[in-house]
Image (cartoon, coloured by chain):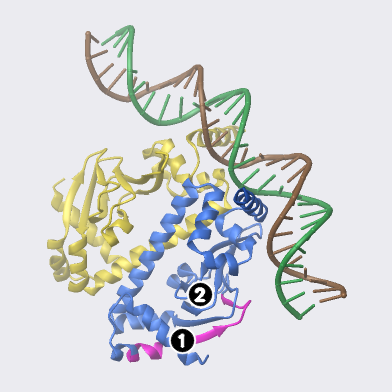
Chain colours: A yellow, B blue, C brown, D green
Amino acid sequence: MSKIALLPPFFTSLRRYIDLSKEEEVELAPYLKQRTYLKGQYICQADDICRYQTFIVSGLARTFYLDTGGVEHVISFGMENWWVGDLCSFASQTPADFNVHCLEKTEVVQISYENLEHLYQLNPKMERFFRLIIQNAYIQSQKRIVRNHSLTARERFVHFSDTYPQLIQRVPQYMIASYLGITKEFLSSIRNQIAKELRN
Amino acid sequence: MSKIALLPPFFTSLRRYIDLSKEEEVELAPYLKQRTYLKGQYICQADDICRYQTFIVSGLARTFYLDTGGVEHVISFGMENWWVGDLCSFASQTPADFNVHCLEKTEVVQISYENLEHLYQLNPKMERFFRLIIQNAYIQSQKRIVRNHSLTARERFVHFSDTYPQLIQRVPQYMIASYLGITKEFLSSIRNQIAKELRN
DNA sequence: CGAAAATTTGACATGACTCAACTGGAGTGG
DNA sequence: CCACTCCAGTTGAGTCATGTCAAATTTTCG
């Protein structure tokens, strides 16, 4: 459980997108920060500046924001091997809209804004890596907009259950409802309806 | 109106994100394709492979897809200085889900998949450029999801009108309705309601 | 001018929300 | 070990936002 253990999975994830020699890993390491957040702690808070791109090695976090009425809206969940943070705040180093909140004890590897800009200079492969990571995130985000437009609440929930079966176990229902853009009551009735149909 | 005229605005756009010497521009130019689409033509069609990242110099296009019921859903509009294409299809060179359809005569600069990979090797600044472009697109996409979750149809329309006043003029209402995720009838009634209030 | 496309209108249907009450754990402390 | 509280989830009644459908009207453009 030593923090040293966090770097290998991080580099494994890098190597899925770019070639990286042992020497290059050694070169990058000094710019990486390892950290463990406890359940309930915040990786990033609204109105603060998001200082890190955060890679989750283990654990679970949710990204949410509070609308003008004080209602929470869950934007995304972050699990093992995902990046989290308020990218808008990070990229422009301005106050964040989003909160990143740990639902479990969460072990991460982080890169600060200054270090990341430095790494981009040091090794252009990092630029490629983040282009690919963000490109994937963007493609998923577009697909989510498509689903929000063409599926009913029930269909979106079924898609979510099929895509992230683990999360159904690990996340309270009201957060899943919020992620899907519906109320907890309505999600409850959808689940009820599905269960009823399965019984027949 | 000669096609030669398309490269300067393209490079101007690049220079908003990266430094680029005259020599570097000359080096890139052979990998760029200039083209003009007529109103009604398709830059990319569903089930084809999206072969180009397309930069719009002038004109207007919409990206849409057909759901399983044959209903059109507008994903985005692309105007001057925007990039369009089915990024998912382009990145993986697999059949596209989306159509990119010109609403006006549209002049573009295009980079093919092979040429872009080549350019990434040739000049790592291109990797940075596209990271930044896609990063912005992703941030906007996230903000759109936020708006879809926390604003009413009317509020979304008002936001759209404020953000893209030009598009209100240039795009048929039923496409705007589709972009906002509502029916043309409901958008019509929203506009009616707003007009009524302005009269008082 | 005439046909096709876009928009509007209105009656009606429904998916999803609100609110308030209730149920049922999971701590917590006496 | 019970009583108490807190939080998540459920249920049901009533409501509202938005969708559907079909017809009428306006605009566009060949």
For the residue labelled by badge 1, is the local secondary structure a helix, a strand or a loop? helix
Regarding residue B98, the answer to whether it shows in the image is: no
Q: Is residue A181 left or right of residue A6?
A: right
Q: The residue under label 2 is which amino acid type?
A: Cys
Q: Is residue A147 above or below residue C14?
A: below
Q: Quadrant of the C terminus of chain A?
A: top right
Image coords of residue B48 (percent x, y): 56, 74
N-term mark: 2 or 1? 1
The residue located at (63%, 58%) in the rendering is B68
Labels 2 and 1 positioned on one and the same chain: yes
Q: Which residues are magenta?
A: B26-43
Q: Secondary structure at mark 2?
A: loop
Q: Which residue is mark 2?
A: B50
x then y, percent, for residue B60:
55, 74
Q: CA distance from mark 2 to mark 1?
A: 21 Å
Q: Quadrant of the N terminus of chain A?
A: top left
- Chain assignment, label 2: B
- Chain hosting mark 1: B
Q: Which residue is mark 1?
A: B6
